């Protein structure tokens, strides 16, 4: 054990505006920036290496839909302009029917009501650059392993050599995602009321490369959906003129990830159900076999903080299924709310309690909407009555 990091933070009472954030993902980078801008000293510990040095190794969902809720936080962090340079506008859903017809269902009346597709890796890199420029201290290759809440010492492991590093903290913020190690450490000391509900459906990512002339091979300014009842495909554009396709299937039944087990099975499924997408995905078999199958679940907690010692934000507090495209947007909203409560409240415990009181009901509502939207996306967007209703709404 190396104790050389102990003592770097100067813990005094009342709190001295120093925060230690676990996770330099999306929420961690934005929260750190917002706090430094408000005069806090912020250290962020990330288990992976620096993606700006060794490339992004996120390993899941390659692009994300960014909505106005998320952009509001990015504007406050001074990151919106840089992020939007990499974003592709999505005006609505492009529904692909089984017979090959398509229909663009706009999200709003005009281009003031749209969402944006951003690459997770590019977004993370931009946010880290902005955080570092603002004065955040970033520590990579530091995975949180354990927390001594009484001594206020966190132990991190360096994945490169397995060495342990101890760090004194005043208070910890868990921005370490759905599998949060901080949440696990808090649970050893206090009951957070944690429960996870698996959806029973999983996903696989595939790639549509650019057309032969380097252009987008299908309409770039749309979120493409192939709804097929119990399952579906979606595709979001990337600024390098590719699309990331996500195939959502049940875990059981037919078809499901139990029956579609290899590249050849996937090709047969696409020939039958996603025929217009098939020629766009030249490496379907390889993508299907090499890319991991992602699980989908909703995480519910009744409490997000452990007095003044730790609080959870983003997926660590409320991971949700991705069908409303709001997990990151909601995580960014958390960052703004937490920064504001930390400034407004006299002590950390009150700030964390006020943050939880404001955000927990909102997170629950978005989690419920995300589950509902799965039914809508896979089942209803190609329903004739539904299309008529949408057409009338647009008039
Ligand atoms: P993460 O982005 O998971 O970041 C956590 C960070 O913590 C990572 O950098 C990780 O390496 C680090 N970390 C983990 N453990 C440790 C540890 N022990 N010590 C130190 N660091 C650690 N949201 C949208 O808004 N729009 C979308 O279109 C959308 N699409 C999605 C599609 C899919 C298939 C999935 C699965 C999710 C989607 N989401 C979407 C949700 C979105 O990805 C998450 O809500 C968002 O990433 C949450 O951000 P976060 O910072 O809380 O967690």
Image (cartoon, rainbow, N blue to C red):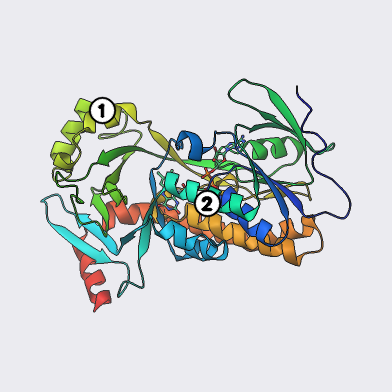
Disc number lying in front (2 or 1): 2
Look at 85% across and 46% down and name the residue there. 11
Which secondary structure lies at badge 1?
helix
Look at 40% across and 42% down and name the residue there. 61
Q: Nearer the viewer, residue 48 or 222?
A: 48
Corner quadrant of residue 250: top left
Look at 58% across and 23% down and name the residue there. 160
Q: Nearer the viewer, residue 206 or 34?
A: 34
Mark drawn on residue 127: 2
**Residue 32 % position (x, y):** 63, 52
Q: Say above or below: 164 vs 113.
A: above
Q: Nearer the viewer, residue 187 or 31?
A: 31
Look at 48% across and 62% down and name the residue there. 80
Mark drawn on residue 286: 1
The answer to which of marks 2 and 1 sits earlier in the sequence is 2
**Residue 354 % position (x, y):** 71, 62
Q: The N terminus is located in which quarter?
A: top right
């Amino acid at each position: 054990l190396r104790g050389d990091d102990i003592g770097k933070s100067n813990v005094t009472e009342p709190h001295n505006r120093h925060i230690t954030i676990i996770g330099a993902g999306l929420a961690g980078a934005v929260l750190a920036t917002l706090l430094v801008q408000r005069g806090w000293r912020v250290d962020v510990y990330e288990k992976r290496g620096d993606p700006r040095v060794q490339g992004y190794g996120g390993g899941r969902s390659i692009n994300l839909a960014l909505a106005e809720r998320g952009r509001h936080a990015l504007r406050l962090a001074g990151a919106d302009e840089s992020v939007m340079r990499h974003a592709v506008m999505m005006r609505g859903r492009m529904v692909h029917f089984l017979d090959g017809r398509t229909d663009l269902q706009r999200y709003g009346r005009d281009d003031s009501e749209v969402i944006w597709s951003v690459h997770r890796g590019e977004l993370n890199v931009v946010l880290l650059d902005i955080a570092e420029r603002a004065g955040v201290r970033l520590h990579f290759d530091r995975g949180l392993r354990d927390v001594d809440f009484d001594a206020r010492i966190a132990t991190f492991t360096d994945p490169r050599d397995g060495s342990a590093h101890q760090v004194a903290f005043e208070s910890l913020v868990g921005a370490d995602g759905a599998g949060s190690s901080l949440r696990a450490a808090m649970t050893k000391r206090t009951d957070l009321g944690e429960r996870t509900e698996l959806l029973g459906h999983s996903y696989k990512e595939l790639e549509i490369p650019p057309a032969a002339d380097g252009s987008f091979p299908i309409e770039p300014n749309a979120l493409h959906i192939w709804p097929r009842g119990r399952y579906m495909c979606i595709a979001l554009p990337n600024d390098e003129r590719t699309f990331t396709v996500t195939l959502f299937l049940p875990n059981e039944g037919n078809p499901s990830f139990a029956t579609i087990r290899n590249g050849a099975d996937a090709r047969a499924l696409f020939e039958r159900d996603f025929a217009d997408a098939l020629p766009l995905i030249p490496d379907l078999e390889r993508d299907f076999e090499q890319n991991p199958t992602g699980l989908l679940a909703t995480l519910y907690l009744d409490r997000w903080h452990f007095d003044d010692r730790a609080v959870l934000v983003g997926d660590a507090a409320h991971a949700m299924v991705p069908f409303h495209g709001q997990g990151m947007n909601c995580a960014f909203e958390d960052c703004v709310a937490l920064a504001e409560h930390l400034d407004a409240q006299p002590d950390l415990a009150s700030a964390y309690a006020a943050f939880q009181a404001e955000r927990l009901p909102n997170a629950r509502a978005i989690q419920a909407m995300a589950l509902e939207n799965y039914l809508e996306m896979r089942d209803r967007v190609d329903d004739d009555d539904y299309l008529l209703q949408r057409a009338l709404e647009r008039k």
